[in-house]
């Protein structure tokens, strides 16, 4: 199967390679299309994001590579749009992946994603050492930022479960996750199947969890595969396995970005 992978990082944010190296690897893999989606600017955390001065170069380089490899692969300009970014020039992007990397408290922004001990410190200090309270706050943030930012794709939806503190079998957790998913699908009907934590050996399954995939299917949501790769060898990582997961859940199609439009392809 020929794939499309729209969630990729380069040296413009926290990836290891250049845009051109990622695109050449995508051609090697015979992909239909690749999107570059470096991290949007977050003024309260500069560890991953693109810096304000580099956005022009980012677009210029994507345009250059897009033209150079036209006929071999489609290249798109995307952005991993953190919920708390104040985004300007939205029209410059072919698509936006909406993500929630932080839970905000009276003390500022706490990374959900960065490290296990950092997530636990936030749970301990601000959520009474209760991961389920933390997850609830995360989903409230996700819903709020999705309503405000209206991205094209819902990114790594259940990231709060990344480090295993949250009990994903807990009915309260599941209800909060499902309620948030259904609210967000009304705004953004395309959800990414993100395999990034599998390639980084943090999880053994995709985001979102299977129980959420069932909800997406039964509410006519659409899915798109994303590797969230930070290096070329991880492009399309675990995509064959993800297709099998989707088929097992009952999906018969997924989305790809092709010819400038999202379209549905059979599995
Ligand atoms: Zn992310
Ligand atoms: Zn990412």
Image (cartoon, rainbow, N blue to C red):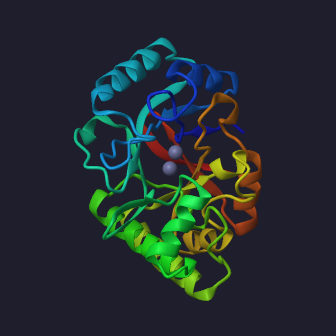
Describe residue 144's horizontal placement relative to residue 199 as left or right: left
Q: Nearer the viewer, residue 242 or 44?
A: 44
Left or right of 150 on screen, residue 133: right
Residue 111 x, y percent position in the rendering: 46, 57
Residue drawn at x 75%, y 58% is: 204
Closest to the observer, 231 or 42: 42
Looking at the image, residue 38 lies above or below residue 45: above
Q: Residue furthest bottom?
A: 171
Residue at 70% across, 31% down: 233
Q: Tag count in the figure? A: 0
Query: Does 181 sit above or below residue 193?
Result: below
Q: Position of residue 197 (x, y in %)?
A: 66, 52
Q: Residue 208 at x, y = what percent?
A: 60, 63
Residue 30 in percent (x, y) is at 68, 26
Q: Residue furthest top?
A: 68
Image quadrant where one finds the N terminus? top right
- Residue situated in front as seen by the camera: 251 or 171: 171
Q: Is residue 59 left or right of residue 3?
A: left
Q: State whether residue 195 appears in this view.
A: no
**Res. 126 in view:** yes
């Amino acid at each position: 199967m020929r794939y499309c992978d729209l969630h990729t990082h380069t040296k413009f944010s926290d990836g290891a390679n250049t845009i051109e190296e990622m695109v050449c690897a995508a051609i090697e893999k015979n992909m239909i299309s690749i999107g570059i989606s470096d991290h949007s600017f977050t003024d309260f955390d500069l560890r991953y994001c693109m810096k304000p001065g580099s956005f022009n170069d980012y677009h210029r380089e994507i345009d250059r590579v897009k033209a150079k490899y036209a006929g071999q692969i489609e290249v798109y300009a995307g952005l991993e749009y953190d919920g708390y970014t104040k985004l300007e020039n939205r029209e410059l992007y072919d698509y936006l992946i909406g993500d929630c990397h932080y839970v905000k408290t009276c003390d500022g922004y706490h990374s959900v994603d960065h490290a296990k001990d950092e997530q636990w410190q936030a749970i301990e200090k601000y959520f009474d050492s209760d991961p389920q309270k933390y997850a609830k706050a995360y989903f409230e943030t996700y819903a709020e930022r999705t309503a405000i930012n209206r991205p094209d794709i819902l990114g790594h939806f259940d990231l709060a479960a990344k480090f295993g503190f949250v009990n994903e079998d807990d009915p309260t957790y599941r209800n909060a996750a499902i309620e948030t998913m259904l609210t967000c699908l009304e705004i953004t009907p395309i959800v990414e199947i993100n395999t990034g934590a599998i390639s980084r050996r943090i999880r053994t399954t995709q985001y979102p969890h299977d129980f959420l995939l069932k909800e997406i299917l039964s509410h006519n949501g659409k899915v798109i595969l994303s590797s969230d790769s930070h290096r070329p060898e991880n492009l399309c990582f675990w995509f064959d396995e993800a297709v099998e997961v989707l088929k097992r859940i009952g999906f018969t199609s997924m989305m790809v970005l092709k010819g400038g439009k999202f379209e549905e392809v059979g599995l």
